């Protein structure tokens, strides 16, 4: 650990000088169900306290250091006080603001500090934990001359905090601070299986979703040559799923209410949605991510295989169906997959058989894919909550 990091972190952490290899990419906290952080890959837990309420992380992929701290209930009167006090104790300066997130008042902020001749820049978040369980504060920083490169990585880290079960299906606090939800809606009309479905999106949904896609793509690209590229892919799609689920929740509800009465079962309903996406115009995005943000697809934008498959995954899980995303670097392709009692070609993940859905060729049903894409080892599963 560099001297800069020692000075900066010693105020926050009573370090046990432990390197704690965690089995998953998510750091969780004893006694706090559903509270965790879905971390970017290639981190080292370079310090922690014995209570398991504070961690320092150093990254091999990016010159980023992060600290996660849980404070007990009653230590601070608000999330903003926790954030401001933490930064003040660290002799870091910068603005902070309150953010409405998860029916609570959280806080986000930016800061800078100087150690000898080294200028550091960073961002931070804080949120109360529901049911009087305390407060979580997360901060991350990098050298100022690396700020542009590392900013997507840092904000992705801050947006990966979960404080309750519902936060697995809603935008992270940083995105919420940039695109606060307002009761400003735009009406949209969808035609599925010959039926007209009226629903709506928030006016900010498309722009906010595009921000998340671009940020997460920049973060994922930092792992292009990493041995953990598969895990980075999975996290990329998990983060998009999390942001998109809430934005498309009303559309999922309205589609289900209109179509379900005419369906034999869940697979029949899923087939109507699969046929619908097969009829989309195939269009590669002109952005670096080459991924169409899901609200834009409902507004009539073009799409390709992974955005269509993700759209199906979000809508179907919103209808309480078991759906996952499958992506393949070898095949440069993506599929949606569902559990079903129907016959068809399936792969097994987590002990379940999943029928694959091909979204880019019209007329195919669940369980039919190209014969030259039949090797399960070439597919990376993305499992959603």
Image (cartoon, grey):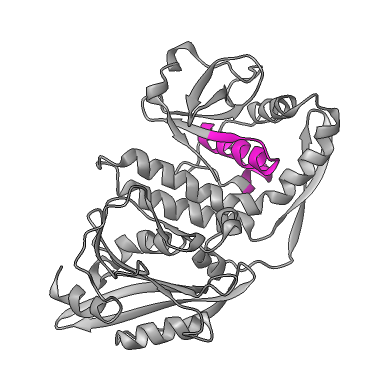
Q: Quadrant of residue 302?
A: top right
In this rendering, the answer to whether 137 lies above or below 20 is below
Q: Nearer the viewer, residue 373 or 302?
A: 373
Q: Which residues are magenta?
A: 295-324
Q: Quadrant of residue 189?
A: top right
Residue at the farthest top position: 371
Pinpoint residue 101: horizontal percent, then vertical percent: 59, 69
Q: Is residue 48 left or right of residue 17?
A: right
Can residue 337 be seen in this snapshot? Answer: yes
Q: Nearer the viewer, residue 171 or 267?
A: 267
Pinpoint residue 253: horizontal percent, then vertical percent: 76, 45
Can residue 288 be seen in this snapshot? Answer: no
The residue at the point 71 percent across, 40 percent down is: 319
- Tell me the quarter of the image containing the N terminus: bottom left
The residue at the point 45 percent across, 82 percent down is: 82
In this rendering, the answer to whether 232 lies above or below 369 is below
Residue 310 part of the magenta segment: yes
The overriding secondary structure of the stretch rendered in magenta is helix
The residue at the point 69 percent across, 59 percent down is: 202
Pinpoint residue 47: horizontal percent, then vertical percent: 24, 66
Q: Is residue 12 left or right of residue 34?
A: left
Q: Is residue 107 left or right of residue 67?
A: right
Pinpoint residue 153: horizontal percent, then vertical percent: 36, 59
Q: Quadrant of residue 7?
A: bottom left
Residue 235 part of the magenta segment: no
């Amino acid at each position: 650990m560099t001297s800069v990091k020692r000075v900066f972190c010693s105020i926050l952490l009573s370090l046990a000088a432990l390197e704690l290899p965690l089995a998953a990419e998510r750091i969780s906290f004893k006694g706090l169900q559903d509270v965790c952080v879905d971390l970017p890959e290639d981190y080292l837990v370079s310090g922690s306290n014995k209570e398991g309420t504070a961690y320092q992380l150093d990254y091999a992929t990016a010159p980023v250091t992060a600290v996660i701290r849980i404070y007990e209930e009653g230590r601070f009167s608000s999330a903003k006080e926790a954030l401001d006090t933490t930064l003040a104790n660290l002799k870091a300066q910068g603005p902070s603001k309150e953010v409405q997130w998860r029916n609570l008042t959280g806080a986000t902020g930016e800061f800078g500090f100087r150690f000898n001749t080294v200028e550091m820049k960073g961002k931070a978040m804080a949120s109360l934990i529901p049911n009087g369980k305390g407060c979580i504060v997360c901060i991350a920083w990098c050298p100022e001359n690396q700020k542009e490169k590392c900013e997507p990585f840092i904000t992705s880290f801050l947006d990966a905090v979960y404080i309750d079960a519902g936060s697995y299906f809603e935008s992270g606090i940083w995105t919420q601070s940039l695109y606060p939800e307002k009761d400003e809606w735009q009406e949209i009309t969808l035609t599925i299986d010959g039926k007209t479905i009226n629903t709506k999106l928030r006016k900010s949904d498309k722009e906010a979703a595009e921000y998340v896609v671009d940020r997460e793509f920049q973060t994922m690209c930092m792992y292009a040559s990493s041995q953990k590229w598969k895990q980075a892919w999975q996290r990329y799609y998990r983060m998009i799923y999390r942001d998109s689920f809430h934005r498309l929740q009303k559309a999922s509800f309205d589609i289900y209410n209109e179509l379900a009465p005419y369906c034999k079962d869940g697979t029949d309903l899923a087939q109507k949605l699969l046929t619908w996406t097969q009829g989309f115009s195939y269009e590669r995005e002109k952005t670096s991510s080459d991924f169409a943000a899901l609200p834009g697809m409902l507004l009539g934008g073009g799409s390709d295989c992974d955005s269509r498959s993700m759209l199906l995954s979000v809508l179907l899980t919103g209808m309480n169906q078991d759906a996952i995303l499958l992506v393949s670097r070898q095949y440069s392709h993506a599929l949606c997959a569902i559990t079903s009692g129907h016959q068809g070609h399936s792969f097994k993940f987590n002990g379940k058989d999943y029928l694959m859905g091909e979204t880019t060729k019209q007329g195919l049903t669940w369980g039919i894919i190209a014969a030259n894409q039949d090797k399960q080892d070439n597919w990376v599963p993305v499992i959603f909550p």
